[in-house]
Amino acid sequence: MTTHEHEPLGGKNPTLGQAARAFFTFHSPRIFAVVLPLLVATRVAVGGFTWSDLLVVPILLAVQPFAEWLIHVYILHFKPTRLFGRTFDLQIAKFHRAHHRDPWRLELVFIPRRAGWLGLAMFSAAWFLLAPTPQMALSGVVGSVVAAFLYEWTHYLTHTGYKPKGEFYRRLWRYHRLHHFKNEHYWQGVTTHLGDRILGTMPDHAGVPNSPTCRTLGIEAPTDLPGPP
Ligand SMILES: [Zn+2]
Ligand SMILES: [Zn+2]
């Protein structure tokens, strides 16, 4: 699906159903729609459920705010760096800079493919190394993929013209728009702002200066993208 076909959705005010239907025309949500049921089926087939599987929920609730914050600040906002005479950049940071430059281009909202698979491999490895049983590790992987999917949906929705109705979503929506249009150094969370509250990037927006580098992240020249996200 091209950018052009999605622009009307970003501009007008879709219903939640319209936004959800458009969501599943993009690459990343489609991958989730295949991978997540497969993982759930695998977990059910493996069996051996105990109370430790439920521990995954508080662990994820505790980790997610900091994971979102750290990834956003240090990986997505990573700046090209000169190292041994060569410029070192991260592919995912290139896509995030393009996302800040053009926040209404919806295909740039999602986790890029390479970063998505790499992320899945990394947090799966972490679960299997740290969990006491492989069953709990697999439950952890399922939970992490659910969390990533909720991140994708929330982030996408804040970039559509869907008008917030409930107070919970309205806050997420407002903070993410402040990150894009007021000052990119604050409001780093997407599904939660607990990380911002604890790490000091959640000021009263009235006292925050408008950042001149919201759109560029301080890199003036547009970055050449390495293909589709
Ligand atoms: Zn965004
Ligand atoms: Zn950002």
Image: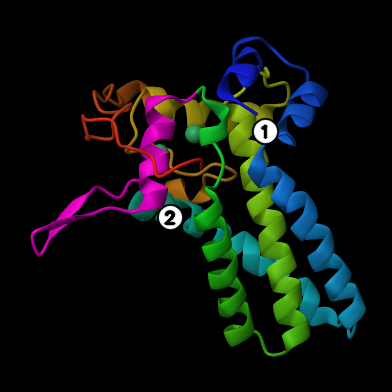
Give the residue at x 28% y 53%: 89
Closer to the observer: label 2 or label 1? Answer: 2
Give the image location of residue 188, x and y in percent. 43, 43
Q: Nearer the viewer, residue 149 or 35?
A: 35
Q: Nearer the viewer, residue 168 or 164?
A: 164
Give the image location of residue 228, x and y in percent. 51, 40
Q: Amino acid at mark 2?
A: Ile
Image height of 140 relative to 115, above or below: below
User: The N terminus is located in which quarter?
Assistant: top right
Q: Residues within 10 Å of mark 2 (few under 14, many from 20)?
A: some
Q: Is residue 200 visible?
A: no
Q: Amino acid at mark 1?
A: Phe
Mark linked to residue 168: 1
Give the image location of residue 208, x and y in percent. 30, 26
Q: Secondary structure at mark 2?
A: helix
- Span highlighted in magenta in the image: 76-103
Total numbered circles: 2
Image height of 106 relative to 51, above or below: above
Image height of 223 relative to 181, above or below: below
Q: Nearer the viewer, residue 150 or 39?
A: 39
- Residue 174 shown left or right of residue 184 in the figure: right
Give the residue at x 65% y 9%: 12
Q: Which residue is mark 2?
A: 71
Give the residue at x 65% y 42%: 27
Give the image location of residue 79, x and y in percent. 25, 47
Image height of 193 relative to 42, above or below: above
